[in-house]
Image: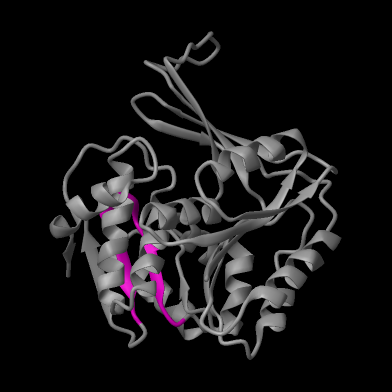
Amino acid sequence: MIYTLTLNPALDYSMTLPRFRVEAINTSNYESIRPGGKGVNISITLENLGHKSVTMGIAAGFTGAEFIRLLSELVPNVDFIVSDDDNTRINIKFQTDVETEINSKGPSKIPFSLYDKIVEKLSSRLVSGDILVLAGSVFPGWPETCHNKLFTALRGKNVTVIVDLNGESLVDSLRFRPYLIKPNRRELCQIFSRELNSTSEIIYHARLLQARGAQRVIVSLGKDGAIFIDENERVFQSIPPRGYVINTVGAGDAMLGAYIAAMAEGKPSIECFKYSMAAGTATAYTSWLATKEEIDALLPKIRII
């Protein structure tokens, strides 16, 4: 079974505006509210591709109740711990001629003791051959190293762990040798506290993360595609086909969801990477997370060099 863990999920409130003016009243012409968070998007993508997963995390307050309701309409196995101590965050996405996101840090009153319940749940359910995806940020005030408890509990279980965590959480996970990590260019720059503008710089720093423990690394580069370093330290780059970008929210998550789907089907790493690029690109060219039909239609156009 595939499990995704999104500790700090969100309701994504998206708006489309004909234009945006500062210090003025702006009126949208389209709005949507959807469940959000990296692991959540990965589970939805897996569902779109015909793979079941268990979507886990912590939801809080009245926004958390709505988050669970909306998510349950999209994926069948929703297993979130519910807290009354605060409210699940709301992220705002609005698009005019450019795309802008305002992401909340998340609720600050969620007790850290709930993480022990997460560890208890997962360590009792995960068995050899299962896949666990750790994705997104931790709650404000929680230690970035909190996943150490879970990694330690899973030792010896032969569980494949995939990591798409933020900053220090990702770096700290490397000593547990995750199967795959997927920072984007911005996150890679933040990890090393420097701008990485050239392909060679990105590859060099991705290799540093691999040397520290990651078995495979994907660095997503937005419109420039992605770089993949496989388990044999071979480097591949994907060039996305030309198309009209509609929405980039969740594109990186769709990439990871498609990689996991292909991996679960027994495909080799390079084919998993190619499929992941088709999913990320198809999502950017649609209004939300791409369907299987949209991904499969784009797959023949993906170039790997």
Asked which quadrant contains residue 200, the reply is bottom left
Asked which quadrant contains residue 279, the reply is bottom left
Is-magenta flag for residue 216? yes
Q: Quadrant of the C terminus?
A: bottom left
Relative to 62, say whether 189 is above or below. below
Residue range corresponding to the magenta coloring: 215-230
Relative to 296, say whether 161 is above or below. below
x and y, in percent, of residue 9 in the image? 63, 48
Relative to 128, say whether 15 is above or below. above
Residue at position x 68%, y 57% from top?
138
Residue at position x 34%, y 58% from top?
197
Nearer to us in this view, 267 or 115: 267
State whether residue 95 appears in this view. Answer: yes
State whether residue 200 appears in this view. Answer: no
Is-magenta flag for residue 19? no
x and y, in percent, of residue 213 in the image? 52, 84
Specify the farthest residue to the front. 76
Residue at position x 84%, y 42% from top?
84
